[in-house]
Amino acid sequence: MASTGTLRVLGVDPGLTRCGVGVVDVARNRSASLVHVGVVRTDPSMPIEQRLAAIAAGLRAVLDEHRPDVVAVERVFAQNNRSTVMGTAQASGIALLLAGERGLPAATHTPSEVKAAVTGYGSADKLQVQTMVARVLRLDELPQPADAADALALALCHAWRGGPTASAGGAGSATLTPAQRAWADAERARVTRR
Amino acid sequence: MASTGTLRVLGVDPGLTRCGVGVVDVARNRSASLVHVGVVRTDPSMPIEQRLAAIAAGLRAVLDEHRPDVVAVERVFAQNNRSTVMGTAQASGIALLLAGERGLPAATHTPSEVKAAVTGYGSADKLQVQTMVARVLRLDELPQPADAADALALALCHAWRGGPTASAGGAGSATLTPAQRAWADAERARVTRR
């Protein structure tokens, strides 16, 4: 659990072969620190049901160890008609399921929302995202591989955009944790002051 | 668990709002009987993570009560570019995950494979599928709603096609249960005799 006043976000860049996971703590002043980063990998020669079970086990281990307040998952589009898109959608469903089973709010963000939040530019390339994530989190090296950097960027995007936004149906303030309510209040106050 | 010599199949017609589930026992002579049929429903106004958790809970209840030998799930295509396709893919991922977590083999079949297996015609309409499912399982009424009939048709399709076929990667005979190995042997013998 994050300390009072900070929001701990698990970002998940879903994928069957490489599923990026990143956990960050974000303070009310928007400063952020790295808690965990990694990649859950599965063997493409394994049956799909075993790959999804391995991804769930990997995500559960991160949830158990780092106890995030919220889970942010990259939104997958059907238009993105690569052969991997269904596996990516299934992996994203696993991440959302695990959040739901723990009573954690979840949110999805599009790749361009994430890039815009982190670099200020919705069409930023992978190196720009990795560079900004490293700068924000004061890392000595660029987070590797790109899936891990994307998971951290997702987590930062979620915290900076404020409040959860469910990808289907409305997640009202009733689903906010105390930390998130505090955050949402702070966000509203900040906007009002402008 | 099914009795010796029969294969118990859970068919899942994945969906967020209505997820069809059907369990059938299929004997070596291909005769089939109904074990369970139902639909797991979730409220579209709920957050996605809670809907997926509700689907998982519903599927777990069926798995616990009826203990199938194998899980068959309708294959979802990205080309099917409806707004619901990502939710459908996520629900299918949950069904496959639950199979994997229990060490059950899983398989996916396309809608046209299912229609062809049950009606002999890959472009059969919903009423034709419902009618054939009712006839095969000796039901007094057509299974309702269509999602439930589709789940039963999937389960029948899987048993009749013989052996699991993983949707990604190869599920070898090592993943077969004893009942399925017996079934696969019988299938091979049957083909050889032709």
Image (cartoon, coloured by chain):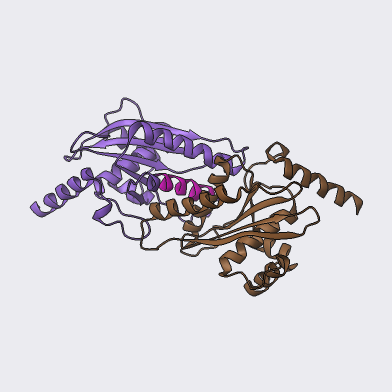
Chain colours: A purple, B brown
Q: Is residue B57 above or below residue A139?
A: below
How many marks overall? 0
Q: Position of residue B94 (x, y in %)?
A: 51, 49
Residue shown at 31%/25% (left/top)? Answer: A140
Asked whether B134 or B174 is in front, the reply is: B134
Asked whether A149 or A168 is in front, the reply is: A168
Left or right: where does residue A174 sit relative to residue B60?
left
Q: Residue furthest right?
A: B193
Asked whether A191 or A65 is in front, the reply is: A65
Q: Position of residue B98 (x, y in %)?
A: 54, 45
Residue shown at 58%/39% (left/top)? Answer: A50
Q: Is residue A103 visible?
A: yes
When asked about the image quadrant of residue B109, the answer is bottom right
Q: Is residue A83 visible?
A: no
Q: Position of residue A74 (x, y in %)?
A: 40, 48
Q: Is residue A150 magenta?
A: no
Asked whether B81 or A165 is in front, the reply is: A165
Quarter of the picture holding the N terminus of chain A = top left
Left or right: where does residue B55 sit relative to residue B140?
left
Q: Which residues make up the magenta segment?
A: A85-98
Residue shown at 54%/53% (left/top)? Answer: B92
Residue shown at 45%/47% (left/top)? Answer: A92
Left or right: where does residue B69 sit relative to residue A143?
right
Q: Is residue A161 above or below residue A30?
A: below
Q: Residue furthest top?
A: A140
Q: Position of residue B131 (x, y in %)?
A: 68, 72
Give the dominant element type of the magenta stretch: helix, strand or loop.
Answer: helix
Q: Is residue B99 above or below residue A135?
A: below
